[in-house]
Amino acid sequence: MRSPKDLLDWSDATLRGFSWHENGHDLVVSMEFLSGVGRRSVRFTWAHALRIDLKFAGHEVGEPMLWKASIDRKAETSHLIHLDFASRGHIAFYCEDLLWDEDI
């Protein structure tokens, strides 16, 4: 079983999508890795305070590329997640726990 710290290894991946599960309590984020690992998903349980700030110039198309991911433990059951897409912006939110694709 992976730990939340494994999220820090996420980089050089494109955002494939995100969706709400469990009646809107959980957020699932899917990324496609350039390293050949393929698509990976993480379920962030009890996600809240979601901020999405992704920018595209009028001529830009395609998925944003993840530059860096960070996780900051705020309490025993609270983590601040920050997905940095460099010049394209970021996604940030709080969650209670992380479940990896092999666990969901």
Image (cartoon, rainbow, N blue to C red):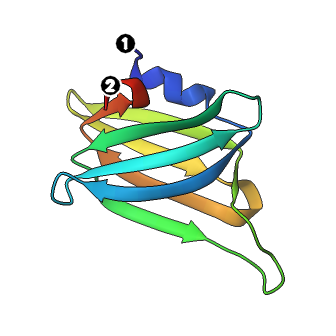
Asked whether disc 1 touches disc 2, contact meaning CB atoms under 8 Å apart, the reply is yes
Residue matched to label 2: 103
Q: Residue at x 84, y 83 (%)?
A: 59
Q: Residue at x 51, y 30 (%)?
A: 7
- Specify the amino acid type for callout 1: Met
**Disc number at residue 43?**
none
- Specify the amino acid type for callout 2: Asp
| Coordinates of residue 60 in the picture (x, y in percent) | 81, 76
| The residue positioned farthest toward the bottom in the image shown | 58
Residue matched to label 1: 1
* 3D distance between C-alphas at marks 1 and 2: 8 Å
| Image-based side of 98 in relation to 70, left or right | left
**Residue 76's quadrant in the figure?**
top left
State the quadrant of the C terminus: top left
Between 37 and 75, the one nearer to me in the picture: 37
Q: Residue at x 77, y 29 (%)?
A: 35
| Image-based side of 44 in relation to 34, left or right | left
- Among the two numbered marks 1 and 2 on one chain, the one whose residue lies closer to the N terminus: 1
